[in-house]
Image: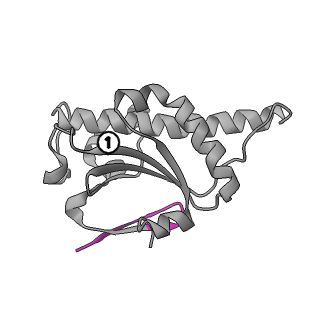
């Protein structure tokens, strides 16, 4: 039976249960980590030879400039910090589960192997109401902020897409 996830006014799925780890709802996160300020993306999806760490948002701020008001700059930085924190913590949480530092409850068998050498890791932010011209500057900013993690985890890129693109890529129904 396929799984769907409702998040940020989007419907993700339908995904085979053996290819989806709903990390945000798993007992390891809900019961032990969330209360200590650990953040999480929505889910991890195994698709082909890739693991997609997917975060969803309804909207995103437009790019800031040197002339932007201080309040707008602060909100933009808070947004970036929230997204990068979720991705950093999700990578670390998943690694701790694979290394059995946390229980492997609800992790599909095909996603339990600590040998990820054959898997490409992709960080994906899906923004429902993002205008196309906002995506590239936001993606560039997130890649810059996470350049160390992208290097450590050998991730090629941090993808930022809107709902329309997510629908074409069969992430959103």
List x then y, in percent, for residue 74. Answer: 72, 33
List x then y, in percent, for residue 135. Answer: 62, 51
Question: Is 158 situated left or right of 109 in this image?
Answer: right
Question: Nearest the camera: 54 or 143?
Answer: 143
Work out whether 45 lies above or below 165: above
At horizontal 36% and vertical 52% (from top left) the residue drawn is 43
Q: Main secondary structure of the magenta part?
A: strand
Q: Which residue is mark 1?
A: 29
Q: Is residue 139 visible?
A: yes
Question: Is 109 situated left or right of 136 in this image?
Answer: left
Magenta stretch bounds: 1-11
Q: Is residue 5 magenta?
A: yes
Work out whether 43 lies above or below 67: below
Q: What colour scheme does the image use?
A: one colour
Q: Is residue 38 visible?
A: no
Q: Is residue 19 magenta?
A: no
List x then y, in percent, for residue 36. Answer: 40, 31
Q: How many numbered callouts?
A: 1
Quarter residue 1 falls in = bottom left
Question: Nearest the camera: 42 or 29?
Answer: 42
At horizontal 68% and vertical 59% (from top left) the residue drawn is 131
Work out whether 59 lies above or below 89: below
Q: Residues within 10 Å of mark 1 (few under 14, many from 20)?
A: many
List x then y, in percent, for residue 173. Answer: 44, 73
At horizontal 17% and vertical 32% (from top left) the residue drawn is 99
Question: Nearest the camera: 149 or 5?
Answer: 149
Secondary element at tag 1: helix
């Amino acid at each position: 039976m396929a799984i769907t996830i409702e998040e940020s006014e989007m419907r993700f799925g339908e995904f085979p249960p053996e290819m989806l780890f709903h990390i945000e709802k798993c007992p390891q996160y809900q019961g032990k980590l969330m209360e200590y300020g650990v953040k999480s993306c929505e889910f991890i999806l195994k698709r082909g030879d890739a693991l997609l760490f997917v975060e969803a948002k309804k909207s995103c701020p437009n790019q800031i400039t040197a002339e932007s008001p201080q309040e707008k700059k602060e909100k933009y930085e808070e947004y970036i910090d929230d997204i990068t924190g979720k991705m950093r913590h999700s990578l670390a949480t998943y690694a701790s589960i694979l290394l059995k530092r946390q229980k492997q409850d609800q992790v599909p068998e095909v996603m339990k192997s600590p040998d990820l050498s054959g898997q490409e890791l992709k960080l994906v932010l899906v923004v429902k109401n993002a205008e196309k011209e906002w995506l590239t500057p936001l993606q560039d900013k997130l890649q810059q902020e996470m350049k160390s993690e992208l290097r450590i985890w050998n991730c090629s890129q941090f993808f930022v897409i809107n709902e329309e693109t997510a629908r074409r890529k069969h992430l959103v129904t």
